[in-house]
Structures are given as C-alpha cells and as structure tokens.
C-alpha cells in the first residue's frame, strides 16, 4: 500500500510565481499597487471586458455586491442551504433576511422551481452557488430574475474556469463573485474578485473596499459611505497572476481527473455501492470538487476514518447552513429542506487538485471500493 497521505485538496504554486512574489517583497511596495491593477486588467479581459475589482476574500466580495445593490433591512435574499456558511452570512451581515430554497438532488445546486416558489414581494435578490464548479441553467436563472425584477449575486467562488454555452462564468450576468482562497482552483492564498455591470458600480466597489474613501474630491479625499478594509495586496495579486496564467491547464487537468474517476469507479458503481455520483459534465464544470453522496447505510465519519486509514483525505462540502445554531436561532428547523439535509449528511469530497495524478485517482478508487464493500478494517 502507498503510505503517502493524499489530502483532498492542496495548492500548487510554481517557481515562477514564487519568484514574482519575492520580487514584490523586495520592491518596497507590498500593499495594493501595480500587481493588483494588472491582475484586475487580466481578469476583466477574461470576463469579456466587464469591470472587475479584487478583494481580500470571496466573502466580502458578496457582501459588497449586496451593498452596491442597496439590499438591507426588510429585504429577502434567496439562497441554497448547501454552501459554505459565508453565502448566507453575508445576507445577515447587511441586515437582510436569508430565505433558503432546497436543492436539486442530482446537481446539488439550488432548485430553481423552489426558488420561484420562495419569491415574495420582499424578495430582492438571489445568491445561487455553483457547487463543485457546476453552473445552474443560467438561461433559466436570468429569465426568472428578469421576470421578478431580482438582482443576482452569483456565488461563483468555486466556478472560475467553468462555462455556460461556451462563455466563461463571470463574462455575463449580474454580479459575479469569485474566491481565491487557498483550496480554490486558482488561489491568491486568500482573496476574491467581483465582476460588475458598469463603472459606476466599480467606483462604489472601490469605496466599500477602502473605508468609503472617494478620490474624486477637488481638495483631496472625502468619505461618503461606510466602507471597510478589504483590499488585496500586491503579494496576493502576484500569486494570482501566476495562477491565472495556468487556468486553462488547471481546468483541463481537473476535467481529465474527473473522467478518470468515472472510468475507474465503473458504470455499475452506484448499483454496486449505493453511492451517488455527480453528473458527468466535462464541458461546463471546472471540477472544483469531485463529490459523492454516500448511501444511508454508511456513516460519513466512519467512511472518512476508514479512508484516512488508507492514507486518503476526504472532505465534506457542506453541512446544511440552516441547521447551524445561528440559523436555528432565527427559526430554521430540521425537516424544512429535506434534500439538503440528506445530501448534507452524506456528501463527501474525494481528492481533487492540480497536482493529483491518475495513479492517485486509482488508489483512491481502490480504497473506496474496499471501504464501501465493508472489506476494510481500521
Ligand atoms: C470559498 C467559498 C466562499 C468564501 O470565499 P472566501 O474567499 O473564503 O471568503 C463562499 N462560497 C463558496 C461556495 C465557497 O466555496
């Protein structure tokens, strides 16, 4: 048995990127500067020329989009219970009311029929999440948003490199938020970016990013909105530029690894084990994660412990947000979103990252086959 521990995710930073970070560190300018400007320029070109601003997280990026849209107290925002808790926390952060809509059991993304059913006269926005990098039916999403006059803040944290009808996610739509946190397909260690609709929104984003400071005053600076401290540093942007240059290679490799997982698990995997695989989409999704839903007979902690005994790290994304104490205290209860609750209990993420090899995939599948067949003891 191979005893090297295989984590479920890990960043790959090449030597050229490390050298460019060292260059920033030696330059005497280590906060936001020319590297941030260059990163924003390259991102904007990739997103079809739309305005893009960078931030120090993907979380604040969504919060700022909500502020730019003027969403706050008394407004409802619809989102999915299966995401990182940041997605719902930003709604609370701006004083608005989170409304959850259950997920589709196949894609594990928010179910647009349930979104439509959750719309009220107070609904102002939808925050869809592209779990594992898999987009929604974007045509349906935007047709619904237009019909009900709703803003969309796409939580595309996991979806850089994903596409819809040949166009990158982010190159169309309303607000689109990406994260460059360490485990994402491309990273800045921590960071994020927001794709906006026009220059007026971009100017507001810059204000919210830095204490509300406006630089347009004739006598220097002024402050006219309450902003925070959310700017990206040139150190982070140098990492981002090095990573972004490899986006195509990274996405292609992840798609190849996903294909290999399906090939190694075999067409009879679900009938053999009861575990549910993700949809086989090698066109739109960037395969940020490769996730399975375990059958009810297997407990996730037990599965994770057994895989760990095979030196394989398993992640889970995510526990249902509405069952966290903060949300239960707001009145959310078990039973409200049964599909999210089932998936949230049984979902696991297999190793998936740029330096993962086909041999690593084979090792993971072999261990998993043994564990799911109950032939593996700790
Ligand atoms: C990573 C992630 C976030 C948060 O991004 P940060 O950069 O860590 O703030 C939000 N939503 C989803 C779906 C994520 O995967």
Image (cartoon, rainbow, N blue to C red):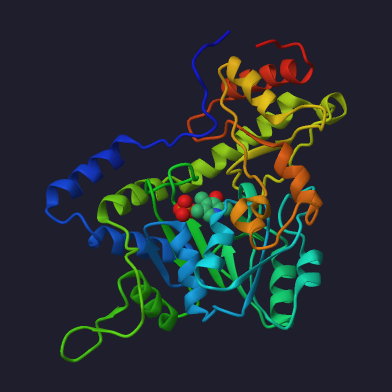
Residue 329: percent from left, percent from top: 64, 59
Of 69 and 249, the residue lying toward us = 69
Residue 160: percent from left, percent from top: 52, 53
Please state, as top left, top right, bottom left or bottom right, where the N terminus lies in the image. Answer: top right
> Number of numbered discs present?
0
Residue 341, placed above or below residue 71:
above
Q: Is residue 160 visible?
A: no
Q: Is residue 300 visible?
A: yes
Say which residue appears at 70% left-offset and 44% top-offset.
344
Q: Is residue 71 left or right of residue 285?
A: left
Residue 370, placed above or below residue 330:
above
Of 220 and 323, the residue lying toward us = 323
Of 334 and 375, the residue lying toward us = 334
Q: Is residue 65 left or right of residue 98?
A: left
Say which residue appears at 78% left-offset and 43% top-offset.
342
Residue 93: percent from left, percent from top: 50, 67
Say which residue appears at 75% left-offset and 50% top-offset.
340
The single residue placed furthest to the top in the displayed view is: 1
The single residue placed furthest to the right in the displayed view is: 271
Q: Is residue 195 left or right of residue 38?
A: right
Please state, as top left, top right, bottom left or bottom right, where the C terminus lies in the image. Answer: top right
Residue 202: percent from left, percent from top: 40, 76
Residue 90, placed above or below residue 18:
below
Res. 126 image quadrant: bottom right
Res. 91 image quadrant: bottom right
């Amino acid at each position: 048995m191979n005893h090297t521990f295989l984590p479920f995710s890990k960043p790959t930073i090449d030597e050229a990127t490390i050298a460019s970070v060292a260059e920033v560190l030696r330059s005497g300018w280590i906060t936001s500067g020319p590297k941030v400007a260059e990163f924003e320029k390259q991102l904007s070109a990739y997103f079809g020329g739309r305005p893009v601003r960078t931030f120090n997280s993907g979380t604040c990026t969504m919060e700022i989009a909500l502020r730019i849209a003027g969403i706050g107290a008394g407004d409802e925002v619809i989102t999915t219970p299966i995401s990182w808790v940041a997605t719902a926390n930003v709604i609370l952060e701006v004083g608005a009311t989170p409304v959850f809509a259950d997920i589709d059991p196949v894609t594990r993304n928010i179910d647009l029929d349930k979104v439509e059913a959750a719309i009220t006269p107070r609904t102002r926005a939808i925050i869809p999440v592209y779990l594992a990098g898999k987009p929604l039916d974007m045509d349906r999403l935007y047709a619904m948003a237009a019909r009900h006059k709703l803003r969309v803040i796409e939580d595309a944290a996991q979806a850089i490199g994903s596409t819809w009808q040949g166009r990158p996610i982010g190159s169309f739509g309303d607000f689109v938020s990406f994260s460059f946190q360490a485990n994402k397909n491309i990273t800045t260690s921590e960071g994020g970016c927001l794709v906006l609709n026009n220059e007026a929104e971009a100017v507001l984003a810059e204000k919210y990013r830095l204490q509300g400071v406006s630089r347009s005053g004739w006598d220097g600076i002024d402050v006219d909105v309450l902003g925070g401290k959310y700017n990206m540093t040139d150190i982070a942007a140098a990492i981002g530029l090095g990573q972004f240059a490899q986006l195509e290679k990274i996405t292609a490799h992840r798609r190849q690894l996903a294909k290999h997982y399906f090939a190694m698990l075999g067409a009879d995997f679900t009938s053999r084990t009861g575990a549910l695989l993700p949809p086989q989409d090698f066109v739109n999704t960037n395969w940020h994660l490769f996730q399975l839903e375990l059958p009810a007979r297997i407990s996730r902690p037990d599965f994770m412990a057994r895989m760990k005994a095979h030196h394989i790290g398993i992640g889970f994304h995510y526990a249902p947000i509405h069952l966290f104490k903060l949300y239960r205290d707001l009145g959310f209860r078990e039973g409200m979103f049964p599909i999210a609750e089932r998936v949230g209990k049984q979902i696991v993420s297999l190793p998936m990252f740029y330096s993962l090899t086909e041999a690593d995939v084979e090792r993971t599948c072999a261990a998993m086959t043994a564990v799911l067949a109950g032939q593996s003891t700790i």
